[in-house]
Image (cartoon, helix red, strand yellow):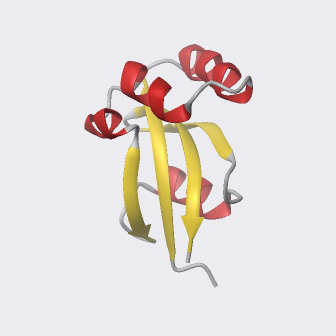
Amino acid sequence: MVKQVHAAHILVKEEAKAKDLLVKVKAGESFSEIAKKFSICPSGKKGGDLGWFSRGQMVREFENAAFDGEKGNVVGPVKTQFGWHLIKVLEKR
C-alpha cells in the first residue's frame, strides 16, 4: 500500500489556464519550468516540488488525485479551495 507520495504541482486561479498549461506539458514542455513561470504557489520557485507527503497532509481533492495518479503522470486539472492544480506524481513509497 502506498504510504507517501512525492509530487510537484502547478497552481493557477482559472481552470482554462490549467488546461492550457496541461497541453504544454503533454507537448513535452518542462513541468518544472512551467511551474516556475506560472504557479502562484510558493513551491513554484522549486519547480512546484512539494516533497514527500502522507495522507492527511494535503486537502482531500489534491491528496486523492496524487495518491490515485500513476508515477510519472500529470493529473488534473484538480480543483481545491486554493485554485486549480496540475499534479505530477514523481515517486511513491
Q: Quadrant of the N terminus?
A: bottom right
The image position of residue 41, as x and y in percent, is: 31, 34
Q: Quadrant of the C terminus?
A: bottom right
- Tell me which residue sits at (74%, 23%) in the image: 27
The image position of residue 26, as x and y in percent, is: 73, 28
Q: Nearer the viewer, residue 2 or 84?
A: 2
Q: Nearer the viewer, residue 89 or 54?
A: 89
Examine the rendered structure and indicate whether residue 53 appears above or below residue 29.
below
The image position of residue 37, as x and y in percent, is: 39, 19
- Tell me which residue sits at (49%, 18%) in the image: 14
Q: Nearer the viewer, residue 5 or 60?
A: 5
The image position of residue 3, as x and y in percent, is: 52, 80
| Rendered image quadrant of residue 15 | top right
| Rendered image quadrant of residue 81 | top left
Examine the rendered structure and indicate whether residue 78 appears above or below residue 35.
below
- Tell me which residue sits at (60%, 64%) in the image: 67
User: So how many labels did they put on this image?
Assistant: 0
